Image (cartoon, rainbow, N blue to C red):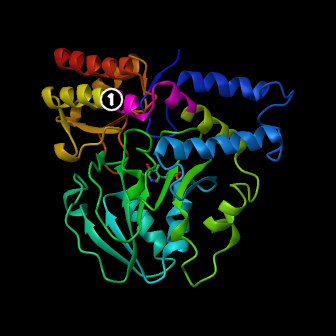
Amino acid sequence: MKKHNFSAGPSILPASVFEKASQAVLELGNTGLSILEISHRSKEFVAIMEEARALALELSGLTGKGYQALFLHGGASLHFYASALNLLERKGAYIDTGTWSHKALTEAQFVGATSVVASSRENGYRNIPTDFALPLDADYLHITTNNTIYGTEYSHYPEVEIPLVADMSSDIFSKEMPMDKFALIYAGAQKNIGAAGVTLVIVREDILGKVSHKIPTHLNYQVHIKNESMTNTPPTFAVYTCLLTMQWIKEQGGIKVIEERNKEKARILYEEVDRNPLFKGYAESKDRSRMNVVFNLVDETLTDQFNALWTEAGISGIKGHRSVGGYRASIYNAMPIESVQLLVEVMKHFEKTV
Ligand SMILES: *Cc1c(COP(=O)(O)O)cnc(C)c1O
């Protein structure tokens, strides 16, 4: 039986994407070849890559605005380093909103000087800090737009004169965002765009080529732009799943429609977390994530009992990250509202049984 998958990533994708991707494993269109064996230089795959790159810009509202979309290897984690390597000359400024932003900072430190301009570490990363002052020599400001582990998310973005860099791994394409405020965006695909193994990088070309150090070929965004995201063999299957998911977003009516659904899913789940006396939410209400709903049991001795109930209901993947404990329900774009309603019912039922 298909489970209700609330996993933080790799995570649920639209059912139609699973079907179309399976079909393409058997045969891609009428090529007589599987997506797994077709050459990345074939006209069929080149068309897939081109369409995926164009659609990523289109969904971001960035077509014709000086940006390029790339599908690269390495996960968001490699782009912690690569983003710094491409941009850091004097200093990288970072806002620390959790594990992932801290990791981004740590990797940038392999490149050069960094500065943490704000952090919510002191209160367990329960909010998004708003006050910060940039050092005069900062080359860019890096933020993590959605903090997958702690369940916090930016709703307003910092206003800065220098390039704004964002790790959008877990909320890209989940809502309308002022994407043109960002100079560099990267996102591991496995949260909201496609199969694991590929990272979407969107970059405004004018910010590149400004550093004085040499950049190794495969970490150099300008090289990838020149080679149209095919400097070496791209993760062909993963790119294909991204294309299918982005097409699905368009078919649903676009990001605005997806955003409305995401709002409703988050609303009903937080409403239950707040109402049900057995649970408490983790993040401060004003900064709560619509993608990752993090909550705990008030009485942890009830853990086994609650776990038995949701497991029985066919729910999977809601155990919290090991650093926070409790529960985390990831309700990405492809998560149907029915699955969220089911989780809410299980929580209500739990209240009646204890
Ligand atoms: C999952 C995640 C990452 C790590 O992504 P990888 O592709 O596994 O490197 C980085 N940042 C955020 C915000 C994430 O949610």
In the rendered structure, the answer to whether residue 180 lies left or right of residue 57 reads left
- Is 321 included in the stretch rendered in magenta? no
Looking at the picture, does residue 195 appear above or below residue 82?
Answer: above
Question: Would residue 84 be visible to someone looking at this image?
Answer: yes
Residue 147 at x, y = what percent?
Answer: 35, 50
| In the foreground, 294 or 263 | 263
Q: Which residue is mark 1?
A: 260
**Ligand 1 is within 8 Å of the C-beta of the residue at disc 1:** no
Residue 156 at x, y = what percent?
Answer: 26, 52
In the rendered structure, the answer to whether residue 88 lies left or right of residue 30 reads left
Question: Would residue 13 be visible to someone looking at this image?
Answer: no
Q: Residue at x 44, y 35 (%)?
A: 7
| In the foreground, 110 or 171 | 171
Q: Residue at x 50, y 71 (%)?
A: 84
Residue type for callout 1: Glu
Q: Residue at x 19, y 66 (%)?
A: 131
- Is 253 included in the stretch rendered in magenta? yes
In the rendered structure, the answer to whether residue 86 lies left or right of residue 155 reads right
Residue 342 at x, y = what percent?
Answer: 33, 17
Q: Residues within 10 Å of mark 1 (few under 14, many from 20)?
A: few
Give the total of numbered labels: 1
Q: Secondary structure at mark 1?
A: helix
Residue 268 at x, y = what percent?
Answer: 24, 25
Quadrant of the image occupied by residue 313:
top left
Quadrant of the image occupied by residue 119:
bottom left
Quadrant of the image occupied by residue 105:
bottom left
Q: Residue reaching furthest front?
A: 64
Q: Residue reaching furthest right?
A: 32
| In the foreground, 319 or 15 | 15
What is the magenta range? 247-261
Principal secondary structure, stretch drawn in magenta? helix
